[in-house]
Structure formats: structure tokens, C-alpha cells
Image (tube, rainbow, N blue to C red):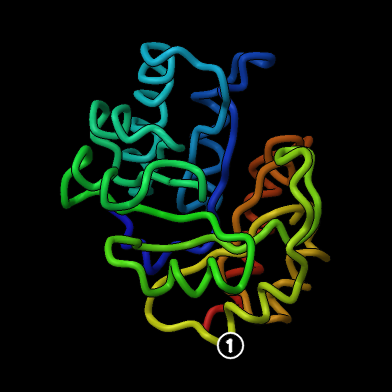
Amino acid sequence: MLDLRDARLYLCTDSRSRTGDLADFLDTVLANGVDIVQLREKGLEALEEMRLLEIFAAAAAKHGALFAVNDRADIARAVDAPILHLGQDDLPVTAARKIVGEDVLIGRSTHSPAQADAARTEDGVAYYCCGPTWTTPTKPGRPAAGIDLVTHASAHQDDRPWFAIGGIETLERLDEVIAHGARRAVVVRAITEADDPGAAAAAFAARLRTSAP
């Protein structure tokens, strides 16, 4: 299994129910450089989410990658997920840890320098995401944190991995967050809505690998 510190490209995707190609899609993007895949789809019943996560788990195992559960500590434990991702309004890390145990990696979303600093030092947080760098329809109503948050995270980083996130829909925007110190990124539509998801994943992954120190 991939070490989290070696992860560069993190993809959030829904269940792809409109296209019905989830297994093939995951296989393609993981084969082309995606390191972590997260199922992000609101409104799923628990059993349906667990069924979908079985597909994520199989694809991640095939490629030596990681998969993540969004918000739901109970489901993360039920499917033996390696990663649980929590937003600012989700369970506190200490409460989630009681549910998932000690081995699950917990990630945090952050939207301000203060939140990023807190996540960087909080016990039990394995990584954090900083954004949204630009406004994005995947988070309607949430204002952009701006490139300054990426700059702040870069200036204060230590050994704890962090990812730029939010509106990184093109290689030009990826280059911009890299120029401000990001070495990892979370993307959604850049890959999920690409005509060729494999090629899009490969291009983003190559850019991030080249930027790594």
C-alpha cells in the first residue's frame, strides 16, 4: 500500500451513476497516476455507500493506492478504509478516532490560515487540505480561500502532508498552486469530466511528480 507521504494526486469522484463506469474509471485513473480516490456523493444510504466503497477498495488494492471515506466514521470502520476525511463541521478527530481505531489515517479540510495551522498540529490528523483555492461548484456557497492560503501552508509546512484543493481544473491552475508551494493537489472535475480521464490523470500526476523536491 502507498505511503501517504508519497501521495501527490488525490481524486474525489461521485459514483458515476450517470455513466455506469465506476470500476473501469477507477482502474483507468489509478493506472495513470492517481494516488488516492475518495467517494464524495451526498445522500447515499449506508448500504449503498458501502457497496460502492467495495469497488473503490478493490481498485485501490489492485494499484497499491489508497481510498478514502468522506465524513462517515462508521462507514470507514465498516469497510476497513485506510483513510477517513473530515470537514470542519464533521466529527471531532478525537470522536472519530474512537470509532475507526488507531490505524485509520484521518484528514482535515481547512479554509483559513488558522484552520490550517490547527490541522498541522492537531493530534491524530495525518494530512490536511487547504482551499478552496478558487470557487468551485462542488462546494456551492463556499467562498474561495484564495492562493494566499496555499502560500501560507507552504511557508509553515513540516512533515505532515497537505494538499491544495478547490477549482484546480486545468494544468495552468495546477501550475499556479505549484508555483506557490503546493506539491500535492486534490482534483475533481479536471479528471471526472475529462474526455479522456486517464490522459488527464497522467498529465496532472506528471506535473506534480516533476514539482516534488
Tell me the amino acid under the disc marked 1. Answer: Ala
The quarter of the picture where residue 170 lies is bottom right
Q: Position of residue 69 (x, y in %)?
A: 41, 37
Observer-nearest residue: 185 or 207?
185
Q: Is residue 145 left or right of residue 71?
A: right
Q: Residue at x 57, y 26 (%)?
A: 41
**Please, is residue 129 above or below residue 84 in the view?**
below
Q: Position of residue 197 (x, y in %)?
A: 68, 39
Vertical order, 21 against 117 (above or below): above
Location of residue 147 (image quadrant) = bottom right
Residue 170 located left or right of residue 103: right
> Compared with residue 172, is residue 105 higher up or lower down, i.e. above or below?
above
Which sits in the foreground, 207 or 151? 151
At x 23% / y 34%, what residue is drawn? 80
Instruction: Look at mark 1 in the image and give the residue it sits on.
Output: 155
Q: Is residue 95 left or right of residue 4?
A: left
